[in-house]
Image: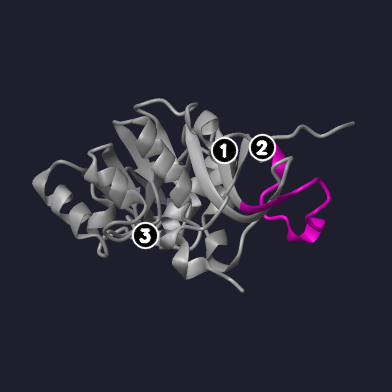
Amino acid sequence: MKLPDKTTAMADAIARIPSGATVMISGFGVPGTPFALIHELIRQGQDNLTVIKNDANETGMGVDHLLAQGRVKRLITTHIGLNPRAVAMMNAGTLEVEFCAQGILAERIRAGGAGLKAIVTDIGRDTDLTRGKPRLDIGGDTAVVELALRCDAALVHAARADTFGNLAYVATARNFAPLMAMAADLVIAEAEEIGPPGALPPDQIHTPGPFVDHVVALEALTEEYGVVRRA
C-alpha cells in the first residue's frame, strides 16, 4: 500500500478555510506559531474568524497581524498581556475574548479531539474565568462544566514532517499542536523539513499522519521565527 503524498502548495491549503471559520493556531509564544500560514490566511482575506490560541503573540507578530486587519471576531486564549492591540480591542468591544486557565484550554481541546462534549472541574470555580458557566453538584461539591473545543481548521508548525503528514515538534512548540491536530476537521501543517515516509523514527512522531490533511514546505524561516532558529 502506497501512502498518499499530502504535500500541498500553501495557497491551495489555506484556500480551504472559509470566512467565518473557527481556527486553532498552535504555538507557545513564538515557538510553534505557524507564521507563514497566518500570513497566507491574511493574504487571502478570510475574515470573521474565531481564533483559538494559547496567546495573542506580540505586536507585529503572528495573530497580531490578523487583529490589525480586523479579521478576528472572537479570541479564545489564556492571556493577551503581551499584545497591547488585543487589550485595546477587547476594552473597546471590537474583539470578544474568552479567557481560560492554560491547563483548562489544553484539556478542552484534548476533550474535543477525544470526542467528549465537556470536562468537569473545580479549577477556576470561584473566579471571573468561569462566571456564567454551567455548574454541577458532585458529591456535595460544586464543579464547573467546561465545554470541549473543536474547530474547522488547525494551523500548526512542525520542525520535521514526512510527505504522509507524520509530524515532529521541538520543545515548547509541542504544547498545543498535537491536541489541536486531533480536534480539527482540517489540519494544515507547515514544516521546516519534509522527508519521505520512514524519515521520522516512529518514537519521534508526535502527530501521526492520519490526523493531517496538508503538509506545506517552509522554504526559509523569516524574522518572526527568530527565537526558534536552531544550529
Query: What's the residue at 50%, 41% (across, down)?
Result: 154
Quadrant for the N terminus in the image = top right
In this orientation, does residue 147 appear? no
| Label 2 CA crowd tier, 10 Å (few <14, some 14–19, many 20+) | many
Query: What's the residue at 62%, 34% (across, down)?
Result: 8
Report the front residue among 23 and 143.
Answer: 23
Report the front residue among 4 and 43.
Answer: 43
Q: Position of residue 132 (x, y in %)?
A: 24, 44
Specify whether 1 is left or right of 52: right
Q: Position of residue 75 (x, y in %)?
A: 30, 45
Residue position for label 2:
7
State the extent of the magenta-drawn residues as a range. Answer: 192-210
Label 2–label 3 contact, CB within 8 A? no
Q: In the rendered image, which quarter is residue 51 located in?
A: top left
Q: What residue type is labelled 3?
A: Ala
Residue position for label 3:
101
Q: Position of residue 185 (x, y in %)?
A: 55, 31
Specify whether 129 is left or right of 120: left
Quadrant for the C terminus in the image = bottom right
Q: Distance between the residues labelled 2 and 3?
A: 35 Å
Residue position for label 1:
187
Q: What residue type is labelled 1?
A: Val
Q: Distance between the residues labelled 3 and 1?
A: 24 Å
Q: In the rendered image, which quarter is residue 28 located in?
A: bottom left
Q: Earlier in the sequence, mark 2 or mark 1?
A: 2
Q: Earlier in the sequence, mark 2 or mark 3?
A: 2
Q: Earlier in the sequence, mark 3 or mark 1?
A: 3
Q: Distance between the residues labelled 2 and 1?
A: 12 Å
Label 3–label 1 contact, CB within 8 A? no
